[in-house]
Image (tube, rainbow, N blue to C red):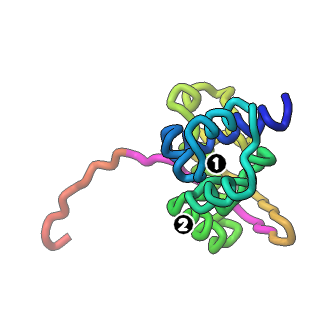
Amino acid sequence: MSFNANCGERLREERDRLGFTQQEMADQMGVRREMSSRYERGQAVPGGDALAALALAGGDIQYVLTGQRSNSAMTPEEIELLSGFRKLDLRGKVNMLGMLDVVGTTSTEISKPTATPRSGSQFLGKVKAKHVTQGDQHIAGDQNIEVGGKSGKKTKKKLGE
């Protein structure tokens, strides 16, 4: 596939991600709708002015040109999540990654013992690990990750107990 075709395909993906119609995308880029359509079909490549305008509208220009996502195109929610993740210690990061594996797994996949999450670990309720290493950080000892919970019955205490 040519650069023009790849660029056009990624431009369409960005338009969809931003929730723009073709006309709205053209307006944001400062071009006519017909030209925007030509960009998406790979018949033309947007110039610097059009790309700069798209960037100001929230478009990921690095992705449009290279296929690699830029951190600057994150939603406010993604920025908040990443900021919070970066503040965690190694144990917190390991726990968060474990939760992502579970949240990203469908109920059908969870019931299959052969389902393997992206990290290569299976989370089927309770996970124990003895050692976790990331860069120059090392945590030794039991690491427990529990997902879900038991439906505990509340008992009433009598006064005086």
Q: Secondary structure at mark 2?
A: helix
Residue at the image point whose x is 62% and y is 34% from the top:
37
The vertical placement of 3 against 65, above or below, is: above
The vertical placement of 148 against 38, above or below, is: below
**Label disc, if present, on residue 127 of the rendered structure:** 1
Residue type of the residue flagged with mark 2? Glu
Residue 75 at x, y percent in the picture:
54, 58
Instruction: Tell me which corner region of the image, top left, top right, bottom left or bottom right, holds residue 89.
Output: bottom right
Report the span colored magenta.
138-150
| Residue 147 sits inside the magenta stretch | yes
Residue 66 at x, y percent in the picture:
81, 47
Residue at the image point whose x is 71% and y is 53% from the top:
61
Residue type of the residue flagged with mark 1? Val
Q: Secondary structure at mark 1?
A: strand
Asked whether, in this view, residue 97 is left or right of residue 136, the answer is: left
Give whichever of 159, 151 is nearer the camera. 151
Magenta span: predominant SS is strand
Residue 38 at x, y percent in the picture:
67, 33
The residue labelled by disc 2 is 80
Q: Quadrant of the N terminus?
A: top right
